[in-house]
């Protein structure tokens, strides 16, 4: 996998689907332009309805099952990368919010000063 572009959003997601997919209390995700992502090798996908009403598709390695990225029909421009894919090369990851805090588990420690949103981040009007 190669990314030739910038990371637009870095966040933690505590929705129940991310908890199931990671086996943890949240996922750590970085959003990049889908056109800036190149995946070498085959992928398989699984699509499901998301809480937002969008369709969320996870792409994974058909050989080992490793999650590679996800895409939402709500924001098809972006590919959501699982930060754990980068191994020890994650010093750049600085999440600025927790989404779906409504399903966050108390045993899953996150920074107290991290902004939390009940579902998606609330939209602000200019």
Image: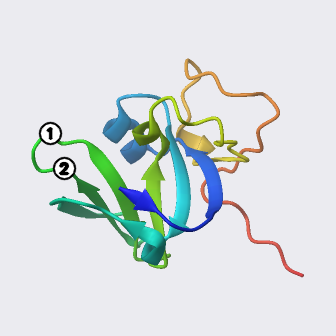
Q: Do we see residue 51 in this rendering?
A: no
Relative side of 115 to 75, left or right? right
Q: What residue did someone put label 1 on?
A: 64
Which type of secondary structure does the marked residue at label 1 adopt? loop
Q: Do we see residue 46 in this rendering?
A: yes
Residue at 32%, 41% in the rendered image:
21
Vertical side of 57 occupied by 34: above or below: below
Q: What residue did someone put label 2 on?
A: 61
Residue at 20%, 60% in the rendered image:
46
Relative side of 90 to 94, left or right? left
Are there few (<14), some (14-19), or many (20+) residues within 10 Å of tag 1? Answer: few
CA separation, marks 2 and 1? 6 Å
Query: Where residue 112 appears, x then y in whole percent?
Result: 78, 28
Query: Where residue 22 appears, x then y in whole percent?
Result: 37, 35
Q: Quadrant of the N terminus?
A: bottom left
Are there few (<14), some (14-19), or many (20+) residues within 10 Å of tag 2? Answer: some
**Please, which residue is most extreme toward the left here?**
63
Instruction: Say how the picture is coloured.
Output: rainbow
Which corner quadrant of the image does residue 126 belong to? bottom right
Which type of secondary structure does the marked residue at label 2 adopt? loop
């Amino acid at each position: 996998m190669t990314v030739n572009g910038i990371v637009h959003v870095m966040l933690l997601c505590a929705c129940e689907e991310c908890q199931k997919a990671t086996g943890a209390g949240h996922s750590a995700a970085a959003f990049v332009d889908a056109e800036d992502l190149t995946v070498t090798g085959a992928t398989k996908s699984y699509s499901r309805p998301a809480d937002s009403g969008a369709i969320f598709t996870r792409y994974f390695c058909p050989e080992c099952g490793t999650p590679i990225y996800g895409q939402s029909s709500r924001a098809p421009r972006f590919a959501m990368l699982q930060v754990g894919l980068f191994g020890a090369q994650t010093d750049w990851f600085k999440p600025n919010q927790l989404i779906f805090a409504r399903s966050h588990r108390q045993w899953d420690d996150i920074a107290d000063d991290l902004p939390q949103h009940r579902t998606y981040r609330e939209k602000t009007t200019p």
